[in-house]
Image: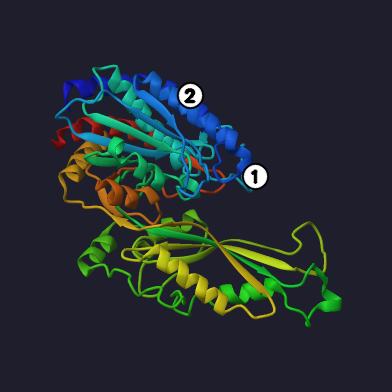
Amino acid sequence: MSSTLEKVQATLDGRKHQALEKLKEFLSMPSVSAKPDHADHVRDCARWLADQLKFAMLDVSLMETHNGKGKAGHPVVIAKNKHIAGRPTVLLYGHYDVQPPEPLDLWKTPPFEATVRKDETGHDAIYARGAVDDKGQVWAHVEAITAWQAHGGVPLNLIVLIEGEEEVGSEGLETFIKEHADQLRADICLISDTGIPDRSTPAITYGLRGLVYAQINLKGPSHDLHSGQFGGATPNPANILCQIISSFHDSQGRVTIPGFYDDVQIVPMEERKILRSKEFDDDAFLGGIKVPFSSGEAGFNIAERICIRPTLDVNGLTSGYQGVGAKTVLPSVASAKVSMRLVPNQNPYEIRDAFERAVKARVPNNVTCEIEFFSESWPAVTPIDSKASKLAAEAVEIAWGKKPAFIRGGGSIPVVADIKRLLNCDTLLVGFGLPDDRVHSPNEKMDLECFYKGIATCAALYEKLAQLK
């Protein structure tokens, strides 16, 4: 660690209280990109973040986005330091939008009133929607950048891109990157929107799954019907939808969509042995979600199922009466939200089309079927033997006192594949979330020790990545 980095880390140590208070302020903004009635909140959050980056002495712009088909999106925050010829350029990506907080009644404290309390393991954590996905991790970088700026400036050319549509599939980001490619070119992209196996094991993620997200809408009778007068004689969209969903997997847990596995990249046994040799605690994984045993594709263990195998899961079901008490109706409509996580080399657009064909082939002719697609993103694998990866591992070791594990993640970050394709730039995925942080669920949290170590890691990353050239 250089003497300058030691000064930066000392500044960060003295700012822990301020860092936490600013994170609380960030988390108080209901920047829910999926809901039109939160559009003003999303924009307010973008403006707030832009102001914080200006305070960090960066040149900041709030730029509009669109999806290439005339639909306006949420703004992108772009910030840069003074670029100096000969220094490496790092593109820092993150997102300030968050998932919807529902169901609200399951939150112990309001989702947009950040609260610090002990988690189930007795460690201090901050609870709020977006705590770890991705505001807490974005804020770790803002704190590190601010500290560096107080000690001569970040020692590399920095481009910050924080978007407001990641949770809805980054609808306008691909178009934005295409239109501003010359301003975004970098030697490496850096993202902190991933996790670590446990509180004592830092990690660098080298693989992510892709995504297809869809909604099946079935419509039968013109209106809800009395179940006594019409039951047994008319099509029930809810029953039919359940039948379709039950047909998605066979007895071995494999997805039954024709062609689903045709292009799946077979992971070499050498890598599977590495995955299986990691200290993945099945009991801890299952205990954290309160289930007695796992489910999934036969022939693979839990660690493999959640990172190197594709999946199809129902994310939401809606049909019929769902209020208190009884109401004996046959519903006229039924819908299901479905996500498919994809692995290399699955093409999300081919999987989307195969899914639509398969569903419609399983729908009887006395109901109508419409399928909406909300997002498609490609899987990605990044090299772990590059100079950038080795420098990142050194930075992680400075902050954590131990070498990081290299892991694959089960989630999706659409921009990783876009940045590789459009900017020819690899991505370092250095995140600080824990498996029990309840991402996308009620009572989302970020462990405070991970937050502070994350800030220290970000500070070290900027010094180490300055050695790329």
Q: Residues within 10 Å of mark 1 (few under 14, many from 20)?
A: few
Can residue 137 be seen at all in this image of the molecule?
A: no
Q: Are marks 1 and 2 in contact (CB under 8 Å)?
A: no
**Residue furthest toward the bottom?**
233
Residue drawn where x is 62% and y is 73% of the image: 242
Front residue of this view, candidates 224 and 436: 224
221 displayed left or right of 24: right
How is the rendered protein coloured? Answer: rainbow
The residue tagged 2 is 21
- Kind of residue sitting beneath label 2: Glu
Residue 53 is situated, as x and y percent measured from the top left of the image, at: 39, 24
Tell me the residue at 26%/34% (across/down): 399
Q: x and y percent of residue 6 in the render?
A: 22, 22
Looking at the picture, tell me which residue is in the foreground, 278 or 376.
Answer: 376
Residue 381 visible in the displayed image: yes
Q: Is residue 83 above or below residue 335?
A: above
Q: Is 214 situated left or right of 254 in this image?
A: right
Furthest residue in direction right, as rendered: 229
Label 1 sits on residue: 104
